[in-house]
Image (tube, coloured by chain):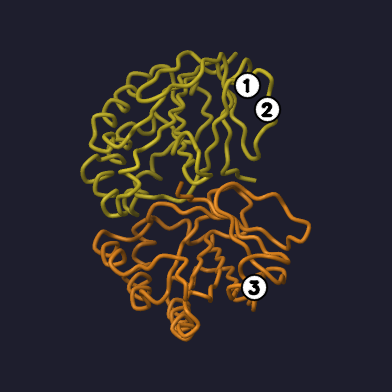
Chain colours: A orange, B yellow
Protein backbone atom coordinates (compact mmCIF):
# COMPACT_ATOMS: atom_id res chain seq x y z
CA UNK A 1 0.00 0.00 0.00
CA UNK A 2 1.17 3.46 -0.85
CA UNK A 3 0.88 5.63 2.23
CA UNK A 4 -0.25 9.26 2.35
CA UNK A 5 0.20 9.82 6.10
CA UNK A 6 3.66 10.19 7.67
CA UNK A 7 4.91 10.87 11.20
CA UNK A 8 8.32 12.44 11.76
CA UNK A 9 9.65 11.51 15.20
CA UNK A 10 12.70 13.12 16.80
CA UNK A 11 14.41 11.21 19.61
CA UNK A 12 17.49 9.21 20.46
CA UNK A 13 17.28 6.74 17.57
CA UNK A 14 16.20 6.70 13.95
CA UNK A 15 17.42 6.24 10.39
CA UNK A 16 18.58 9.86 10.19
CA UNK A 17 21.05 11.64 12.47
CA UNK A 18 20.09 15.26 13.19
CA UNK A 19 23.01 17.56 12.44
CA UNK A 20 21.29 20.91 12.99
CA UNK A 21 17.93 22.42 13.94
CA UNK A 22 17.63 26.05 12.82
CA UNK A 23 14.85 28.47 13.84
CA UNK A 24 14.12 30.46 10.71
CA UNK A 25 10.92 32.20 11.86
CA UNK A 26 8.86 31.87 15.04
CA UNK A 27 9.36 29.16 17.63
CA UNK A 28 11.87 26.38 16.93
CA UNK A 29 11.77 22.70 17.83
CA UNK A 30 13.46 20.88 20.72
CA UNK A 31 16.88 19.40 20.07
CA UNK A 32 17.27 15.66 19.53
CA UNK A 33 19.92 13.40 18.04
CA UNK A 34 17.90 11.35 15.53
CA UNK A 35 14.87 11.51 13.27
CA UNK A 36 12.69 8.63 12.08
CA UNK A 37 9.89 8.61 9.53
CA UNK A 38 6.85 6.39 10.04
CA UNK A 39 4.41 5.82 7.16
CA UNK A 40 0.76 5.22 8.08
CA UNK A 41 -0.81 5.29 11.54
CA UNK A 42 0.76 7.20 14.43
CA UNK A 43 3.58 5.20 16.05
CA UNK A 44 3.37 4.54 19.80
CA UNK A 45 5.00 7.42 21.69
CA UNK A 46 8.54 6.53 22.77
CA UNK A 47 10.10 7.54 26.10
CA UNK A 48 12.92 9.27 24.21
CA UNK A 49 10.56 11.21 21.91
CA UNK A 50 11.41 14.92 21.69
CA UNK A 51 8.64 15.74 19.22
CA UNK A 52 6.38 14.12 16.65
CA UNK A 53 5.08 15.97 13.59
CA UNK A 54 2.50 14.53 11.19
CA UNK A 55 1.61 15.37 7.62
CA UNK A 56 -0.36 13.87 4.74
CA UNK A 57 0.30 14.00 1.02
CA UNK A 58 -2.65 15.38 -0.90
CA UNK A 59 -3.88 16.70 -4.22
CA UNK A 60 -2.06 19.54 -5.98
CA UNK A 61 -3.21 22.95 -4.77
CA UNK A 62 -1.52 25.28 -7.27
CA UNK A 63 0.28 23.37 -10.02
CA UNK A 64 -1.33 23.59 -13.44
CA UNK A 65 -1.16 20.78 -15.96
CA UNK A 66 1.81 22.16 -17.90
CA UNK A 67 3.78 22.68 -14.67
CA UNK A 68 2.82 19.25 -13.36
CA UNK A 69 3.94 17.61 -16.60
CA UNK A 70 7.26 19.45 -16.42
CA UNK A 71 7.71 18.25 -12.83
CA UNK A 72 6.77 14.66 -13.66
CA UNK A 73 9.50 14.52 -16.31
CA UNK A 74 12.32 15.33 -13.90
CA UNK A 75 11.07 14.65 -10.36
CA UNK A 76 13.28 11.98 -8.75
CA UNK A 77 12.01 9.45 -6.22
CA UNK A 78 12.91 9.55 -2.53
CA UNK A 79 15.30 6.91 -1.21
CA UNK A 80 18.09 7.16 -3.79
CA UNK A 81 21.26 5.46 -2.58
CA UNK A 82 23.37 8.59 -2.77
CA UNK A 83 20.78 10.81 -1.06
CA UNK A 84 22.49 10.70 2.30
CA UNK A 85 21.49 14.24 3.26
CA UNK A 86 17.96 15.39 3.97
CA UNK A 87 16.14 18.36 5.45
CA UNK A 88 12.70 18.52 7.04
CA UNK A 89 11.16 22.01 6.86
CA UNK A 90 7.96 22.55 8.84
CA UNK A 91 6.20 25.79 7.89
CA UNK A 92 3.16 27.70 9.10
CA UNK A 93 1.63 30.46 6.99
CA UNK A 94 -0.19 33.50 8.33
CA UNK A 95 -3.94 33.88 8.82
CA UNK A 96 -3.81 36.51 6.04
CA UNK A 97 -2.60 33.85 3.57
CA UNK A 98 -5.47 31.52 4.38
CA UNK A 99 -8.03 34.30 3.96
CA UNK A 100 -6.94 34.89 0.37
CA UNK A 101 -9.03 33.34 -2.38
CA UNK A 102 -7.62 30.62 -4.63
CA UNK A 103 -6.78 33.01 -7.50
CA UNK A 104 -5.04 35.41 -5.10
CA UNK A 105 -2.90 32.62 -3.60
CA UNK A 106 -2.08 31.21 -7.04
CA UNK A 107 -1.06 34.71 -8.21
CA UNK A 108 1.45 35.00 -5.36
CA UNK A 109 2.59 31.36 -5.56
CA UNK A 110 3.55 31.22 -9.21
CA UNK A 111 3.32 34.41 -11.30
CA UNK A 112 4.90 36.47 -8.50
CA UNK A 113 7.00 34.00 -6.51
CA UNK A 114 7.73 31.39 -9.21
CA UNK A 115 7.58 28.61 -6.63
CA UNK A 116 7.40 25.75 -9.14
CA UNK A 117 9.73 27.42 -11.62
CA UNK A 118 12.41 27.83 -8.93
CA UNK A 119 11.94 24.24 -7.75
CA UNK A 120 12.33 22.92 -11.30
CA UNK A 121 15.81 24.45 -11.57
CA UNK A 122 17.04 22.10 -8.84
CA UNK A 123 15.62 18.89 -10.28
CA UNK A 124 16.54 16.07 -10.40
CA UNK A 125 19.19 16.87 -7.77
CA UNK A 126 16.71 17.56 -4.98
CA UNK A 127 13.97 15.00 -4.25
CA UNK A 128 11.00 16.34 -2.34
CA UNK A 129 7.76 15.26 -0.70
CA UNK A 130 5.18 17.78 0.53
CA UNK A 131 2.90 16.88 3.45
CA UNK A 132 -0.12 18.93 4.53
CA UNK A 133 -1.07 19.34 8.19
CA UNK A 134 -3.37 22.37 8.51
CA UNK A 135 -6.62 20.42 8.18
CA UNK A 136 -5.91 17.71 10.76
CA UNK A 137 -7.40 19.94 13.43
CA UNK A 138 -7.62 23.36 15.05
CA UNK A 139 -4.34 23.23 16.98
CA UNK A 140 -1.76 21.99 14.47
CA UNK A 141 1.65 23.61 15.00
CA UNK A 142 2.45 23.75 11.26
CA UNK A 143 0.58 23.90 7.94
CA UNK A 144 3.14 21.96 5.86
CA UNK A 145 6.10 19.64 6.30
CA UNK A 146 8.42 19.41 3.32
CA UNK A 147 11.02 16.63 3.19
CA UNK A 148 14.00 17.11 0.86
CA UNK A 149 16.69 14.50 0.00
CA UNK A 150 19.93 15.00 -1.91
CA UNK A 151 23.56 13.91 -2.22
CA UNK A 152 26.19 15.73 -0.11
CA UNK A 153 27.58 17.48 -3.20
CA UNK A 154 24.15 19.03 -3.86
CA UNK A 155 24.04 20.76 -0.49
CA UNK A 156 25.04 24.15 -2.03
CA UNK A 157 22.29 23.80 -4.66
CA UNK A 158 19.78 23.04 -1.92
CA UNK A 159 20.87 26.13 0.03
CA UNK A 160 20.39 28.22 -3.12
CA UNK A 161 16.90 26.80 -3.57
CA UNK A 162 15.98 27.75 0.00
CA UNK A 163 17.40 31.24 -0.43
CA UNK A 164 15.46 31.81 -3.65
CA UNK A 165 12.17 30.70 -2.12
CA UNK A 166 12.71 32.72 1.05
CA UNK A 167 13.36 35.84 -1.02
CA UNK A 168 9.99 35.44 -2.78
CA UNK A 169 6.75 37.33 -2.11
CA UNK A 170 5.17 34.07 -0.92
CA UNK A 171 7.51 33.98 2.10
CA UNK A 172 5.98 37.24 3.40
CA UNK A 173 3.14 34.93 4.44
CA UNK A 174 5.34 32.49 6.41
CA UNK A 175 5.12 33.07 10.17
CA UNK A 176 6.90 29.96 11.47
CA UNK A 177 9.66 27.96 9.80
CA UNK A 178 12.21 25.51 11.14
CA UNK A 179 15.01 23.62 9.36
CA UNK A 180 15.85 20.14 10.60
CA UNK A 181 19.03 19.05 8.81
CA UNK A 182 19.90 15.35 8.88
CA UNK A 183 22.42 12.81 7.55
CA UNK A 184 21.62 9.18 6.97
CA UNK A 185 22.67 7.26 10.08
CA UNK A 186 25.24 4.52 9.50
CA UNK B 1 -13.50 30.80 19.99
CA UNK B 2 -14.67 30.20 16.47
CA UNK B 3 -14.40 26.49 15.71
CA UNK B 4 -13.25 24.91 12.46
CA UNK B 5 -13.72 21.24 13.46
CA UNK B 6 -17.20 19.68 13.72
CA UNK B 7 -18.47 16.18 14.54
CA UNK B 8 -21.88 15.05 13.31
CA UNK B 9 -23.24 12.28 15.54
CA UNK B 10 -26.28 10.18 14.68
CA UNK B 11 -28.03 8.37 17.54
CA UNK B 12 -31.13 8.43 19.71
CA UNK B 13 -30.92 12.07 20.80
CA UNK B 14 -29.82 15.39 19.36
CA UNK B 15 -31.00 18.84 18.35
CA UNK B 16 -32.14 17.55 14.95
CA UNK B 17 -34.63 14.75 14.24
CA UNK B 18 -33.64 12.63 11.21
CA UNK B 19 -36.55 12.41 8.78
CA UNK B 20 -34.80 10.53 5.95
CA UNK B 21 -31.44 9.05 4.98
CA UNK B 22 -31.11 8.59 1.22
CA UNK B 23 -28.33 6.67 -0.55
CA UNK B 24 -27.57 8.73 -3.65
CA UNK B 25 -24.38 6.96 -4.74
CA UNK B 26 -22.34 4.19 -3.15
CA UNK B 27 -22.86 2.90 0.39
CA UNK B 28 -25.39 4.68 2.61
CA UNK B 29 -25.32 5.35 6.35
CA UNK B 30 -27.04 3.46 9.18
CA UNK B 31 -30.46 4.67 10.24
CA UNK B 32 -30.85 6.67 13.43
CA UNK B 33 -33.51 8.95 14.89
CA UNK B 34 -31.50 12.07 15.76
CA UNK B 35 -28.44 14.06 14.73
CA UNK B 36 -26.28 16.32 16.89
CA UNK B 37 -23.46 18.64 15.89
CA UNK B 38 -20.43 19.07 18.15
CA UNK B 39 -17.98 21.92 17.52
CA UNK B 40 -14.34 21.32 18.46
CA UNK B 41 -12.79 18.12 19.82
CA UNK B 42 -14.35 14.71 19.23
CA UNK B 43 -17.20 14.07 21.70
CA UNK B 44 -17.02 10.91 23.83
CA UNK B 45 -18.63 8.01 21.96
CA UNK B 46 -22.20 7.39 23.18
CA UNK B 47 -23.77 3.93 23.62
CA UNK B 48 -26.57 4.96 21.22
CA UNK B 49 -24.20 6.26 18.53
CA UNK B 50 -25.02 4.97 15.04
CA UNK B 51 -22.22 6.88 13.32
CA UNK B 52 -19.96 9.89 13.77
CA UNK B 53 -18.62 11.93 10.86
CA UNK B 54 -16.05 14.69 11.20
CA UNK B 55 -15.13 17.63 9.01
CA UNK B 56 -13.14 20.84 9.22
CA UNK B 57 -13.77 24.19 7.58
CA UNK B 58 -10.80 25.37 5.56
CA UNK B 59 -9.55 27.88 3.02
CA UNK B 60 -11.37 28.35 -0.30
CA UNK B 61 -10.21 25.84 -2.90
CA UNK B 62 -11.86 27.21 -6.07
CA UNK B 63 -13.66 30.51 -5.45
CA UNK B 64 -12.00 33.52 -7.02
CA UNK B 65 -12.17 36.98 -5.47
CA UNK B 66 -15.12 38.20 -7.55
CA UNK B 67 -17.11 35.05 -6.72
CA UNK B 68 -16.17 35.23 -3.05
CA UNK B 69 -17.28 38.87 -2.88
CA UNK B 70 -20.60 37.98 -4.52
CA UNK B 71 -21.09 35.17 -1.97
CA UNK B 72 -20.16 37.40 0.98
CA UNK B 73 -22.87 39.88 0.02
CA UNK B 74 -25.71 37.37 0.22
CA UNK B 75 -24.49 34.40 2.31
CA UNK B 76 -26.73 34.01 5.37
CA UNK B 77 -25.49 32.70 8.74
CA UNK B 78 -26.41 29.29 10.14
CA UNK B 79 -28.84 29.17 13.06
CA UNK B 80 -31.60 31.45 11.74
CA UNK B 81 -34.81 31.04 13.77
CA UNK B 82 -36.89 29.94 10.81
CA UNK B 83 -34.28 27.47 9.51
CA UNK B 84 -36.01 24.45 10.96
CA UNK B 85 -35.01 22.13 8.12
CA UNK B 86 -31.47 21.01 7.38
CA UNK B 87 -29.63 18.45 5.29
CA UNK B 88 -26.19 16.91 5.81
CA UNK B 89 -24.62 15.67 2.56
CA UNK B 90 -21.44 13.61 2.88
CA UNK B 91 -19.66 13.15 -0.45
CA UNK B 92 -16.62 11.28 -1.69
CA UNK B 93 -15.06 12.08 -5.06
CA UNK B 94 -13.24 9.62 -7.29
CA UNK B 95 -9.50 8.98 -7.41
CA UNK B 96 -9.59 10.47 -10.93
CA UNK B 97 -10.81 13.81 -9.51
CA UNK B 98 -7.94 14.01 -7.02
CA UNK B 99 -5.38 13.26 -9.73
CA UNK B 100 -6.45 16.31 -11.73
CA UNK B 101 -4.34 19.44 -11.42
CA UNK B 102 -5.75 22.61 -9.86
CA UNK B 103 -6.56 24.27 -13.20
CA UNK B 104 -8.32 21.10 -14.43
CA UNK B 105 -10.46 20.86 -11.29
CA UNK B 106 -11.27 24.59 -11.41
CA UNK B 107 -12.28 24.25 -15.09
CA UNK B 108 -14.79 21.53 -14.20
CA UNK B 109 -15.95 23.21 -10.97
CA UNK B 110 -16.89 26.60 -12.34
CA UNK B 111 -16.66 27.21 -16.11
CA UNK B 112 -18.25 23.82 -16.86
CA UNK B 113 -20.35 23.00 -13.80
CA UNK B 114 -21.06 26.54 -12.53
CA UNK B 115 -20.96 25.32 -8.93
CA UNK B 116 -20.76 28.77 -7.32
CA UNK B 117 -23.08 30.37 -9.88
CA UNK B 118 -25.76 27.76 -9.19
CA UNK B 119 -25.31 28.11 -5.42
CA UNK B 120 -25.68 31.91 -5.65
CA UNK B 121 -29.17 31.56 -7.17
CA UNK B 122 -30.42 30.00 -3.94
CA UNK B 123 -29.01 32.62 -1.58
CA UNK B 124 -29.96 33.87 0.95
CA UNK B 125 -32.63 31.15 1.25
CA UNK B 126 -30.14 28.31 1.77
CA UNK B 127 -27.42 28.67 4.44
CA UNK B 128 -24.44 26.36 4.00
CA UNK B 129 -21.21 25.31 5.68
CA UNK B 130 -18.63 23.14 3.90
CA UNK B 131 -16.38 20.82 5.93
CA UNK B 132 -13.35 18.99 4.51
CA UNK B 133 -12.42 15.46 5.61
CA UNK B 134 -10.13 13.94 2.98
CA UNK B 135 -6.88 15.00 4.65
CA UNK B 136 -7.61 13.74 8.17
CA UNK B 137 -6.13 10.39 7.22
CA UNK B 138 -5.90 7.53 4.76
CA UNK B 139 -9.20 5.85 5.64
CA UNK B 140 -11.76 8.65 5.74
CA UNK B 141 -15.17 7.53 4.45
CA UNK B 142 -15.93 10.89 2.81
CA UNK B 143 -14.06 13.87 1.32
CA UNK B 144 -16.61 16.56 2.25
CA UNK B 145 -19.58 17.11 4.52
CA UNK B 146 -21.89 19.95 3.52
CA UNK B 147 -24.50 21.19 5.97
CA UNK B 148 -27.46 23.16 4.58
CA UNK B 149 -30.16 24.99 6.60
CA UNK B 150 -33.40 26.55 5.33
CA UNK B 151 -37.04 27.28 6.19
CA UNK B 152 -39.67 24.61 5.36
CA UNK B 153 -41.03 26.74 2.49
CA UNK B 154 -37.61 26.72 0.84
CA UNK B 155 -37.49 22.93 0.62
CA UNK B 156 -38.46 22.98 -3.10
CA UNK B 157 -35.70 25.50 -3.83
CA UNK B 158 -33.20 23.29 -2.01
CA UNK B 159 -34.28 20.26 -4.05
CA UNK B 160 -33.79 22.31 -7.24
CA UNK B 161 -30.30 23.28 -6.10
CA UNK B 162 -29.38 19.63 -5.52
CA UNK B 163 -30.79 18.59 -8.89
CA UNK B 164 -28.84 21.31 -10.71
CA UNK B 165 -25.54 20.35 -9.05
CA UNK B 166 -26.09 16.64 -9.61
CA UNK B 167 -26.73 17.26 -13.31
CA UNK B 168 -23.36 19.02 -13.63
CA UNK B 169 -20.11 17.64 -15.07
CA UNK B 170 -18.54 17.85 -11.58
CA UNK B 171 -20.89 15.14 -10.30
CA UNK B 172 -19.35 12.63 -12.74
CA UNK B 173 -16.54 12.60 -10.18
CA UNK B 174 -18.77 11.79 -7.17
CA UNK B 175 -18.56 8.12 -6.17
CA UNK B 176 -20.35 8.20 -2.82
CA UNK B 177 -23.12 10.54 -1.69
CA UNK B 178 -25.69 10.34 1.08
CA UNK B 179 -28.48 12.74 2.06
CA UNK B 180 -29.35 13.02 5.75
CA UNK B 181 -32.53 15.11 6.00
CA UNK B 182 -33.43 16.53 9.40
CA UNK B 183 -35.94 18.79 11.16
CA UNK B 184 -35.19 20.81 14.24
CA UNK B 185 -36.26 18.73 17.27
CA UNK B 186 -38.86 20.41 19.53
Which image quarter: residue B45? Answer: top right
Tag nearer the camera, 1 or 3: 3
Q: Nearer the viewer, residue A141 or A186?
A: A186
Query: Do tag 2 and tag 1 residues touch (Cβ < 8 Å)?
Result: yes
In the rendered image, the vertical position of residue A119 relative to residue B63, given as above or below: below
Query: Do tag 1 and tag 3 residues touch (Cβ < 8 Å)?
Result: no
Q: Chain of mark 3?
A: A
Q: Position of residue B141 (x, y in %)?
A: 48, 33
The residue singled out by tag 2 in the image is B45
Q: Is residue B145 left or right of residue B4?
A: left
Residues at discs 1 and 3 both on one chain: no
Q: CA distance from mark 1 to mark 3?
A: 46 Å
Quadrant (top left/top right/bottom left/bottom right) for the C terminus of chain B:
top right
Q: CA distance from mark 2 to mark 1?
A: 7 Å
Residues at discs 3 and 2 both on one chain: no
Which image quarter: residue A63? Answer: bottom left
Residues at discs 2 and 1 both on one chain: yes
Task: Check disc 3: other Cα within 10 Å, few if <14, some if 14-19, many if 20+.
Answer: many
Q: Position of residue A127 (x, y in %)?
A: 43, 70
In the rendered image, the vertical position of residue A43 relative to residue A126, given as above or below: above
Task: Check disc 2: other Cα within 10 Å, few if <14, some if 14-19, many if 20+.
Answer: few
Q: Nearer the viewer, residue A63 or B33?
A: A63
Q: Nearer the viewer, residue B180 or B23?
A: B23
In the rendered image, the vertical position of residue B169 relative to residue A2, given as above or below: above
Task: Check disc 1: other Cα within 10 Å, few if <14, some if 14-19, many if 20+.
Answer: some
- For the residue labelled by badge 2, is the local secondary structure a helix, a strand or a loop? loop
The residue singled out by tag 1 in the image is B49
Tag nearer the camera, 3 or 2: 3
Query: Do tag 3 and tag 2 residues touch (Cβ < 8 Å)?
Result: no
Q: Chain of mark 2?
A: B
Q: Is residue B174 left or right of residue B31?
A: left
The residue singled out by tag 3 in the image is A17
Amino acid sequence: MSHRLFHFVAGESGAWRITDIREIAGAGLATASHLSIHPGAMPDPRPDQAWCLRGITSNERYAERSEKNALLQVQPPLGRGDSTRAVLIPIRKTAAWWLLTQDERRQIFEPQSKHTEIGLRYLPAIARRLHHCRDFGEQEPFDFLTWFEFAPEDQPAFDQLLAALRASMEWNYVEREVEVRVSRAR
